[in-house]
């Protein structure tokens, strides 16, 4: 029988997550023929228990991250003794700290916590400086945020922008992008007015935000009215308002979510839209195994294996090897398989550090030392108390379809619209204060018990009724010593991931660790103001009082979930893998568009930055063609500032 002919398209995109889904949809909208190879399936089409609710319902995101139908469970090393830290063993007997990833349509946007915060201007300007490419300057990159966002939580400015045809828009928000962004207010979403009010009061007092007023009742009402109007206009607690760029002060902040009427939205919806209206094709259950090159190192296609659960990070990997296939690219191949899998795929294709490739018998077609190096993440830790009574908002909650709160959610209301964060605020560590820098700590008060990621972590959340967790997250960590290594030349084997945390990494000053300790101490000062509602702190707890004890606790218990920077843009002498237009150095027709591309981990939260770079990449890719970029409604959009 004759061999089936290879499929040929303009662009082959590997991965349908925040990077891949976004860029693929944009290319399809510009009239290109595009196929996405996605190792997972569409969560809506899986018969697994609790899908599609685990996907759709914001409050179910912890269950989504443990849903075996979507999960790729990595076991990573971050610091010290893995077995002591979190003795999680996978189906293959591998031990290490659990690091959840989603392998499904939408990638990790299918299980993430939906927080959408654009990085500060300084992050983009640093890339412009590193590369000498002005198209990375913050004033040029902001347009990509506007292109993707459909902001639903600033109604006054939305209305003014509509009325003026977009000419008056000091907020810098986007009003007609493909990603709906909303903010469930704490009381609306969670109820428990007295407790929320007390927490807010304690935070404000500890941050010195509360101003004592000697005004009469009427005066205080007027003061509140003026304050509310000011917030409405200036949006001083809106981290995505461009007027706050570089000026974000310590204090309460909104944590905008990528939801549409309280339902998760992300790369999956983006891809589905382009499939329906622009012929974007997705090959599900397709594990890319190698990029195909011609003799001039031009990427001409991708080899993949077709089959369910082929990758050995699946909770229950299949035994069959899958069927070997190829798809050819007339124009380019775009890798968007995420910060662990993109460098793995490059190395399997002979692009990477020659010594490492040689160890696995892979010929180095393109020697590139930086591939898989520079791995970065944040540090996160929880300060946990029991509350004096169960949360009112969790009364009757079963976290399942059919419970009364789920019925409310179906009507677009109630606490299931929320990701569980009652309140968020930003802080400066001592080092940031000394340097006069912006806040580098983000804290969320969660109405649950959250101890990080390990097998069964979501059961604790499911059963929690009276806990309050202050999750402290360190942004802009200094450590770039992490690495992704091949464990074998078999594309079904996950790579070894070594974050080299704390003293094992490159943060010689120890600033990262000190900052997290500062965060915990500041939170403790706040919780000391709420004794009426809270039992004594149980985590870290009484045994971890002074800074040395806290350092010890944080080293052993911190977690992260924003892995990035493993194929960074930048000059090769600085470990750079990509040119500033996302092209892989030493190759033709091959780009990377996902969390791997950043030289340094951006902002407080990463996904907004990934969506933005994917929008930017689509312009860079279409620049090489005569196609006109369009938006998701099929309307032509302006090209970006010329690339250098
Ligand atoms: C639990 C959790 C919560 C999070 N919450 C937030 C949050 O609230 N806000 C925020 O900003 N960030 C959050 N993040 C981080 C954010 O979601 C991810 O960093 C982001 O989605 C990564 O995007 P990406 O495009 O790099 O890769 P991904 O979104 O991971 O997509 C990669 C895709 O590639 C596919 N793939 C991989 N290898 C192959 C292969 N060989 N062949 C074919 N397909 C392949 C995978 O199946 C996957 O679908 C969270 C992450 C986690 C784990």
Image (cartoon, rainbow, N blue to C red):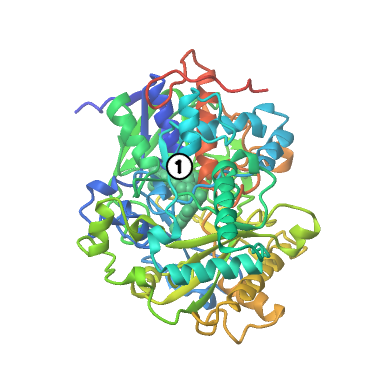
Task: Answer whether residue 336 is visible to the viewer in this image.
Answer: no
**Residue at (69, 27) in percent of width and height:** 134
Measuring from the top left, give residue 245's x and y in whole percent. 66, 42
Measuring from the top left, give residue 533's x and y in whole percent. 49, 79
Query: What is the residue that sits farthest to the bottom in this orientation?
Result: 543
Measuring from the top left, give residue 474's x and y in whole percent. 63, 60
The kind of secondary structure element at disc 1 is helix
Q: Is residue 88 left or right of residue 572?
A: left
Query: What is the residue that sits farthest to the right in this orientation?
Result: 434
Measuring from the top left, give residue 405's x and y in whole percent. 27, 62
Depth order, front residue of 373/102: 102
- The residue labelled by disc 1 is 18
Total number of numbered discs in the rendering: 1
Depth order, front residue of 627/86: 627
Image quadrant in which the N terminus is located:
top left
Disc 1: CA contacts within 10 A as few (<14), some (14-19) or many (>=20) = many
Depth order, front residue of 621/250: 250
Does the closest atom of ligand 1 sit within 8 Å of the Cβ of label 1? yes
**Residue at (76, 59) in percent of width and height:** 433
Image quadrant in which the C terminus is located:
top right
Q: Is residue 548 left or right of residue 410?
A: right
**Residue at (30, 49) in percent of width and height:** 321
Depth order, front residue of 523/296: 523
Task: Answer whether residue 102 is visible to the viewer in this image.
Answer: yes
């Amino acid at each position: 029988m004759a061999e089936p002919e290879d499929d040929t398209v303009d662009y082959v995109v590997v991965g349908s997550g925040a990077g891949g889904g976004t860029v693929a949809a944009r290319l399809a909208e510009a009239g290109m023929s595009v196929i996405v190879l996605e190792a997972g399936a569409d969560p809506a089409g899986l018969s697994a228990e609790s899908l599609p609710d685990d996907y759709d319902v914001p409050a179910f995101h912890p269950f989504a991250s443990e849903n075996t139908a979507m999960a790729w469970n990595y076991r990573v090393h971050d610091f010290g003794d893995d077995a002591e830290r979190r003795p999680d063993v996978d189906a293959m007997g591998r031990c290490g700290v659990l690091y959840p990833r989603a392998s499904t349509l939408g990638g990790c946007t299918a299980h993430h916590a939906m927080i959408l915060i654009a990085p500060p201007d300084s992050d983009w300007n640093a890339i412009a400086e590193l590369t000498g490419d002005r198209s990375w300057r913050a004033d040029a990159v902001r347009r990509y945020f506007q292109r993707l966002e459909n902001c639903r939580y600033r109604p006054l400015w939305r209305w003014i922008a509509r009325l003026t045809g977009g000419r008056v828009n000091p907020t810098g928000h986007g009003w007609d992008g493909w990603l709906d962004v909303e903010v469930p207010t704490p009381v609306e979403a969670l109820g428990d007015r007295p407790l929320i009010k007390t927490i807010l009061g304690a935070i404000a007092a500890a941050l010195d935000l509360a101003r004592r007023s000697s005004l009469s009742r009427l005066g205080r009402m007027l003061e509140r009215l003026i304050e509310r109007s000011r917030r409405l206009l200036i949006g001083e607690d809106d981290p995505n308002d461009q007027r706050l760029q570089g000026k974000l002060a310590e204090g309460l902040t909104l944590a905008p979510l990528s939801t549409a009427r309280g339902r998760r939205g992300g790369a999956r919806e983006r891809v589905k839209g382009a499939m329906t209206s622009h012929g974007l094709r997705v090959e599900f259950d397709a594990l890319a195994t190698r990029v195909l090159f011609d003799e001039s190192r031009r990427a001409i296609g991708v080899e993949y294996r077709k089959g369910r659960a082929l990758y050995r990070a699946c909770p229950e990997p299949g035994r069959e090897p899958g069927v070997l296939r190829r798809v050819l690219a007339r124009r380019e191949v775009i890798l968007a398989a995420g910060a662990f899998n993109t460098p793995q795929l490059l190395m399997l294709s002979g692009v990477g550090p020659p010594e490492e490739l040689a160890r696995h018998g892979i010929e180095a077609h393109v020697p590139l030392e930086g591939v898989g190096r520079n791995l970065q993440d944040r540090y996160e830790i929880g300060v946990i108390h029991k509350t004096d009574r169960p949360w009112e908002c969790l009364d009757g909650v079963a976290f399942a379809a059919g419970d009364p709160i789920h019925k409310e959610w179906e009507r677009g209301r109630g606490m299931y619209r929320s990701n569980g964060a009652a309140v968020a605020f930003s802080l400066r560590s001592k080092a940031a204060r000394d340097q006069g820098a912006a806040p580098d700590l983000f804290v969320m008060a969660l109405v649950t018990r959250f101890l990080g990621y390990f097998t069964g972590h979501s059961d604790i959340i499911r059963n929690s009724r009276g806990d309050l967790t202050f999750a402290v997250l360190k942004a802009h960590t200094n450590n770039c010593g992490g690495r992704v290594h091949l464990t074998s030349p078999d594309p079904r084997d996950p790579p070894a991931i070594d974050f080299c945390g704390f003293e094992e990494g490159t943060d010689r000053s120890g600033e990262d660790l000190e900052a997290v300790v500062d965060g915990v101490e500041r939170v403790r000062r706040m919780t000391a103001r709420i004794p009426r509602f809270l039992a004594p702190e149980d985590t870290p707890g009484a045994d971890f009082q002074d800074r040395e004890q806290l350092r010890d606790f944080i080293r052993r218990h911190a977690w992260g979930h924003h892995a990035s920077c493993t194929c960074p843009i930048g000059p090769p002498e600085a470990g750079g893998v990509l040119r500033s237009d996302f092209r892989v150095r030493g190759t033709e027709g091959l780009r990377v568009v996902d969390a791997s591309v950043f030289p340094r981990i951006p902002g407080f939260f990463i996904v907004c930055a990934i969506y933005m770079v994917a929008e930017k990449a689509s312009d860079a890719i279409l620049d090489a063609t005569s196609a006109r970029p369009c938006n998701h409604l099929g309307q032509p959009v302006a090209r970006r500032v010329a690339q250098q």
